[in-house]
Image (cartoon, rainbow, N blue to C red):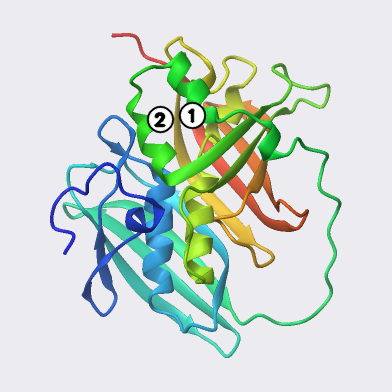
Amino acid sequence: MLDTVPEPDLGLVDCLGLEQLDRDLFRGWCHDGIPLRAFGGQVAAQALTAAGRTVPADRTVHSLHGNFVRAGDTARPLEYAVERVRDGGSYLSRRVTATQGGETVFTLTASFKRPEPGLDRQPPMPPTPDPGELPDTYRLWAETNPGDYRQAVFSRVMDMRYIAGPAEPTTSGLTEQRLWLRSAEPLPDDPKLHACALAYASDLFLAPSTVLSIEPPRMLRDEPASVFLTSLDHAVWYHRPFRADEWMLFAQRSPTVADGRGIAFADVWSRDGLLIAHVVQETVVRPMRTP
């Protein structure tokens, strides 16, 4: 029973674990993303977990679209109510509403399908340093920000290797960065679990790619943030089978910031060069308020 705040040293499988309260109602706990606010990637992944619990084993998720309505409180559980929108012969649709204290925190729509043969094409994977050649990002994070609780939490859930891109926008206006990510623990052979793991990872440092021309990501700087970032909406499209406990390259880019909002994209590749997913996120971008 998940009736108390989870221990802080839980791994990815535990972070995605949900208690089933009713046929289509589930409950879960989230760790901090910033102090006392739930990490959005975990909320999205738990919502997708809840949706996946209501579909047959032969259906896999091919897309999700989420909206962050308000911050989640990590001192209280979230409840995930699943609506079975459509059960078709090939495609199934689910809508999930995550609430806390009677207020909506996050909404998700997800679509599942049966795998099928057909046309298969993709561009080549961009040249990228192998993760084995790169330093452990959490070690750099601990050196620049000793005692940062996020380093301790995320390092138990995801292995990470950071590849810096150009600090200034390119001539096309893009800011770019790349991350190698994988589950820090081996995962069971469950495609839905691997999809949820990718959803969790897809929110790691995607929003900061919108402001790389102003400041580097948190794990690479020792100065306080000058910009406030928080996710507004998030979408993932899954293209090919993959394992989230093997290295995944998140090639992130942000083409524009305007009107207090930025948008960022990520192409997600397997280590052997398969294009496995695309991610899009819109985020609030505002100057950090001073006390």
Residue 252 falls left or right of residue 158: right
Q: Residue at x 76, y 58 (%)?
A: 274
Question: Is residue 265 rendered to the left or right of residue 21?
Answer: right
Q: Residue at x 41, y 70 (%)?
A: 51
Q: Is 271 placed above or below 25 here?
A: above
Amino acid residing under circle 2: Gln
Q: Which of the 4 image quarters holds residue 254?
A: top right
Q: Residues within 10 Å of mark 2 (few under 14, many from 20)?
A: some
* Quarter of the image where the C terminus is located: top left
Does 261 appear above or below 224? below
Q: Position of residue 263 (x, y in %)?
A: 61, 36
Say left or right for 123 vs 102: right
Quadrant for the N terminus, please: bottom left
- Which disc, if any, is residue 187? none
Label 1: how many residues lie within 10 Å, few (<14), some (14-19) or many (20+)?
many
Q: Position of residue 109 (x, y in %)?
A: 47, 64
Which residue is identified by label 2?
151
- Residue 290 position in % (x across, y down): 34, 9
Residue at 69%, 64% in the rendered image: 239
Q: Which residue is mark 1?
A: 138
Quadrant in which residue 94 is drawn: bottom left
Which residue is drawn at the image coordinates 40% and 42% (left, top)?
Answer: 156
